[in-house]
Image: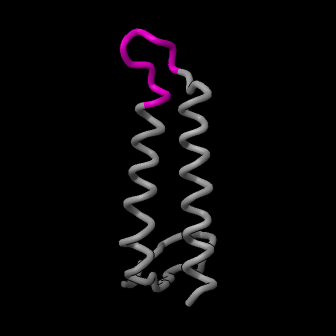
Amino acid sequence: MSIHILSPEFSRNSTFHVLQETLTRDIPVVVALTVSLFIMGYGFRGRQGRINRIEGAILLAVYIGYTAYLSRSVFIK
């Protein structure tokens, strides 16, 4: 898949290729973590909009697990 960018950082009209595997693996994880971070930090049910230790530990564990998964998938191939 090609992504077309019009940006001052790149040339006037740049195109770069993204592997389909990256889109199907990374985008759902990023969206799920963004939604979970919003839900944890928003402050539903009258509580303050803060992330407690348990929620922080869950987010940290998911980050460590996903990073390990990515590292393993790169180096095992």
Query: What residue is at 39 percent from the left and 50 percent from the top?
Result: 32
Please state if 42 lies on the left or on the right of 71 as rendered. left
Q: Is residue 47 above or below residue 64?
A: above
* Towards the viewer: 30 or 18: 30
Measured as percent of width and height from the top left, residue 47 is found at 46, 12
Q: How many marks?
A: 0
Q: Residue at x 36, y 84 (%)?
A: 1
The residue lying at 40 percent from left, 9 percent from top is: 46
Residue 13 coordinates in the image, percent (x, y): 49, 81
Residue furthest to the top: 46
**Spot occupied by residue 33 in the image (x, y as percentages of width and height):** 45, 48
Is the C terminus in the top left, top right, bottom left or bottom right quadrant? Answer: bottom right
Residue 4 lies, in percent from the top left, at 42, 78
Q: How is the image coloured?
A: one colour
Residue 72 lies left or right of residue 23; in this view the side is: right
75 over 9 or under it: above or below = below
List the single residue furthest toward the bottom: 77
Residue located at (37% from left, 81% from top): 20
Q: Quadrant of residue 26?
A: bottom left
Q: Main secondary structure of the magenta part?
A: loop
Q: Is residue 44 magenta?
A: yes
Q: Which contiguous range is marked in magenta? A: 40-49
Residue 71 falls inside the magenta stretch:
no
